[in-house]
Amino acid sequence: MDMSAQPSFRVHIASLVVNGLGTVARGPLARAVEAELSRLLAAGGGNAAAFPSGHRPRVDGGAFTMAAHPRAAELGTQIGAAVHRGMVSP
């Protein structure tokens, strides 16, 4: 067995609920969330041990302040960061 291999894990988001969201293009928003979450996970080394409880049926990303008319990319970055914070908190 190769002990130098990085452990891997998979993140599956079945649904993402964002309260207070106006009309934002869903496709670009989803891509931005995925990109930011991937970036943050990679920056942390993709270490599966960083996620204390393994499977989580729900992650609370908390609250953040949105601009009055956010672009999908900006909003997706904020949401991805919030989801990441929720994933790494106990």
Image (cartoon, rainbow, N blue to C red):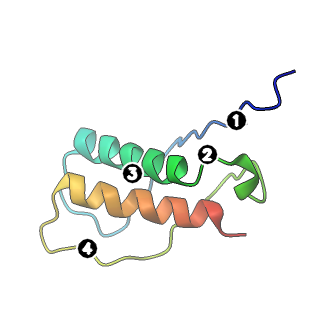
How far apart are the two marked residues, 4 and 1, measured between alpha carbons?
36 Å
Instruction: Look at 26% across and 38% down and name the residue there.
Output: 27
Callouts 2 and 1 close, C-beta under 8 Å: yes
Looking at numbered disc 2 in the image, what kind of residue is underneath it?
Gly
Q: Pointer 4: what residue?
A: 66
Q: Earlier in the sequence, mark 3 or mark 4?
A: 3
Q: Nearer the viewer, mark 4 or mark 1?
A: 1
Q: Nearer the viewer, mark 4 or mark 2?
A: 2
Find residue 22 and report its image quarter. Answer: bottom left
| Residue 45 against residue 12 in the figure, above or below | below
Q: Position of residue 80 (x, y in %)?
A: 42, 56
| Residue 36 against residue 83 in the figure, above or below | above
Q: Position of residue 5 (x, y in %)?
A: 73, 30
Q: Nearer the viewer, mark 1 or mark 3?
A: 1
Q: Pointer 1: what residue?
A: 6
Instruction: Look at 14% across and 74% down and name the residue there.
Output: 68
Looking at numbered disc 3 in the image, what kind of residue is underneath it?
Glu
Q: Pointer 2: what residue?
A: 46
Instruction: Look at 40% across and 43% down and name the residue there.
Output: 34
Q: Nearer the viewer, mark 2 or mark 3?
A: 2
How far apart are the two marked residues, 1 and 3, measured between alpha carbons?
20 Å
Looking at numbered disc 4 in the image, what kind of residue is underneath it?
Met
Q: In this view of the protein, can residue 60 be seen by the observer?
A: no
Q: Earlier in the sequence, mark 2 or mark 3?
A: 3
Q: Pointer 3: what residue?
A: 36
Q: Horizontally, is 10 left or right of 7 in the view?
A: left
Residue closer to the observer: 46 or 62? 46
How would you rate the neighbour count of disc 2 (Cα within 10 Å): few for under 14, some for 14-19, many for 20 or more? some
Q: Earlier in the sequence, mark 1 or mark 3?
A: 1
